[in-house]
Every structure is written in structure tokens, then in C-alpha cells.
Amino acid sequence: MKLLLISNSTNAGEEYLKYPIRQIGEHLSGVREIVFVPYAAVTFSYAEYERKVQRRFDEIGVKVRSIHREKNPLKTICEAEAICVGGGNTFALAKKMQEQGLMKAILRKIKNGTPYVGWSAGSNVCCPTICTTNDMPIVEPQSFKAIGAIKFQINPHYLDANPAGHAGETREQRILEYIEANPRRYVAGLREGCMLRYADGKLTLIGERPMRIFKKGMAPREVTASDDLSFLL
Amino acid sequence: MKLLLISNSTNAGEEYLKYPIRQIGEHLSGVREIVFVPYAAVTFSYAEYERKVQRRFDEIGVKVRSIHREKNPLKTICEAEAICVGGGNTFALAKKMQEQGLMKAILRKIKNGTPYVGWSAGSNVCCPTICTTNDMPIVEPQSFKAIGAIKFQINPHYLDANPAGHAGETREQRILEYIEANPRRYVAGLREGCMLRYADGKLTLIGERPMRIFKKGMAPREVTASDDLSFLL
């Protein structure tokens, strides 16, 4: 397996996909074309999404081929050199991927060594379920099951505080609810600007901020880029 | 129908259910006992939830009878003087309500005039679906369909800004995704400290902050407590 699971496409105030593009380039070393899954886009078109990603991927010399233009999406996945799933709304993404049977097909490819890159919703769907997304359930997918290439859940865009004066649950409170209801799963709170890379049997945190780890019965704790993350595998 | 749909139980820095208790008391005028649905609780017990609500409802002289202690929850709903659904995790709440067949039973009661009070997740489940919750999908309900006593969606805890430096979607962006995918529905962004009351065929906003209205094809707009809200009905 060769995975790059990115918290967020864009840091506040920066250009789209700017901060992770060097890592994406290294992860896709030798790849000429990626199959892109744009189905998390809701308020802009899949074609726009493809163009936006292509503009950034031009910098690493990789062609972006969006699956929404293909007559046979499953065949396109089966023949992909690499697979890339973009962010947006996780429920919209999961629904369309399930309708087209992409979850299982992508898992098979990942297990055979095809590189995978996801950011935000694209990182969420690589987990066992979509249960730790931050997104609004704007449409109903067939199920919450996702690709399941990894055994733990990622919470992308992990953040520590609520805006001042807001009484809604903090992100930590939401994840504590998740682990209460799902006591066997680890959750990795992946802060913005950070990513997880799995390659050569090893999982690594990339980024300057620590990642927050949650599991039922354990106090939440921080791990850094130098820590051994094999307990998540 | 007689509904009181509250954004949030507790304003930041205040005591539990303190700010809305006077309105709840007026809404439940003449009621001696409410049937309480505590199933949104995840990290604390239903019994604790019942006690917490009872402590506040003591101020208005109303007994709280939690449905989790009943052998026949459906019968308990059918015989209820009034129904109250508390906040917490909307997915956990919907799952358990669906398993016990409570959604339809509560709709029938509401249509027959039984007073309903909900806050946060308890307001969400009164809508056609749970699709505009802010909660994390920690468990998978049978479906996203909810009670459907009103025809529009409420987004409780509506808030305007992200914490500084955070690049995740704002609440407005999330709701714009919802109306893109659900073009026929209104969404009411109900800010903290506010509630919607339906009584005598009239819908009223109660609270000092405006409510933000979203519908596909219309610019989002603010309405205040003095505005006519009949367009939502």
C-alpha cells in the first residue's frame, strides 16, 4: 500500500493545494497520469474541479483524468496508474462512489500497490467508515462504510477550540462521542497543514503540528512526526 | 401543532437549560408531566440526562419521565401529555428513535396537538430529515428521515465565522451545499440563544439575534423576531 492522506487542500490564506504539492509529487514519483474522483464537489462542477487540480498538478508533471467523464468508471479505476480523491462533502462523495461501486475497486487497487492520494473528504473515505467526517449530511449514502484501506479513523481539519462564545460541541467532544460508540477504533485528529503517509509498511506523520490520538479508555494524547505510529496499523 | 424548537440548551458560560426555561414553561402551560427522549446522550447515561433536565424542569413544576425506563416506549409516547427531545448527538438519537418506531408515533401526537419541545438535536429531528445537523455521524441510523412536523430544515447553533486561521468550510458554506443538493427546502440558521415557536397556526422567532434563511436560487437573508415567517410553513 502507498497512501498519502492529507488533512486539508489549502491552508488559510494560501493558494489551492499549494502546501502539499511537493509531497504529492514525491508520493507520485514515476506516475504520469492519475485518475481523479471529484464527487465531493457540490457547489461547483466536476469539470471545474478537474481543471483546478490539473493546474496545480502541472507543477509536478502529472496529468489529471477525472472519472466523471468516463463511460466505465470501474474499468478506469482498474487501469489507473494512481488514484486521487479530492475534498468537499464526504456524504456526496461516498454516495456517488457507492453508486458506482468504486469503494471496493479502489481497495483492491490500493492492496495491489497503486498509489492513493486523498485530502479532507478524500482522506475520510480511505478509512473504515465516513464516521469521523466534519461535513454536513446533505445527502444520504447507501451506508457509512468506506474504502477501509487503513484500520483507524482520520478526523481531518482537526481543531482545538470553538470560536469564542460558541456553546456547540468542540471537535474533541465530538470524537469522544465517536469512541464511546465505537470503542475498538483509534481516531487520529489530523490538524490542518499535516498529512499521513503510508509507504514501505511504515506510517509517518508529515507536518509541523502534532496529531491528537483518541481511543476509548485512553486519555487523548499528542504524537509528533518523529513518533512511531505502528500502533495504528 | 404546538412546537418549541430551541437552538441550544445552554449559552456559553450559563447554566444548563437556564435561558429557555421560561419559554418552555409558557409552552407547557397546564402540563404536569412530559415524556422525555434522552437518546442523544452518548458520553453520559440516560438516567443522568433525565435527572439534569428534571432539576431545571422543577422550576416550572413539570415532572420529567424518561422513555428509556419504559417497557413499551411506543405506548408511553401515545399516552404522553407532552413530548420533549433533548440535544446531544443527532445520529445516535435518530438511530434509537427509528429502532423504537418513535418518529411516526411522535408525528401523530404532534398533529393531534400534543406539545413538543426540542433543543439542538431535538429540534433537528422535528425537521423532515436530520440533514442539517452539525453533529458527527458516529453511528449509522436506518435513514436520515426524521419526524417531519415542519417542512423546513433547522440548523441549530448557527454561527457565522470559523476560528481564526481555520480553513475548513464555514457553516454558511455547508448549508449552501445542502441547498444545492436539496433545492426545494428552506434552511433556517437558528443562532444560539434563539428558538422557533409554532402555536395557533403561527411560526415565531424568539430571541435577540436574527435567523439566517437559505434557499437555492435566493441570496441568504436575515429575518428577525418581528418578521412574518409564514413562507416557511
Image (cartoon, coloured by chain):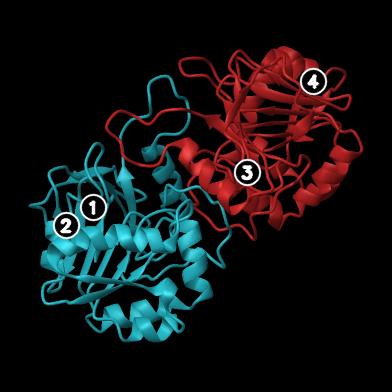
Chain colours: A red, B cyan
Closer to us: B217 or A128: A128
Q: Residue at x 44, y 57 (%)?
A: B41
Q: Which mark is residue A39?
A: 3
Question: What whole-number distance in Å separates the C-alpha atoms at marks 1 and 2?
Answer: 6 Å
Tell me the element at label 1. loop
Closest to the camera, between mark 4 and mark 2, is 2
Pointer 1 residue = B17
Q: Residue at x 60, y 33 (%)?
A: A120
Tag 2: Cα neighbours inside 10 Å, few (<14), some, or many (≥20)? some
**Chain holding disc 4:** A
Question: What whole-number distance in Å separates the C-alpha atoms at marks 4 and 1?
Answer: 51 Å
Can residue B73 be seen in this snapshot? yes
Seen in the picture, residue A72 relative to B166 is either above or below; the reply is: below
Pointer 4 residue = A27
Q: Residue at x 58, y 19 (%)?
A: A193
Amino acid found under the numbered disc labelled 1? Leu
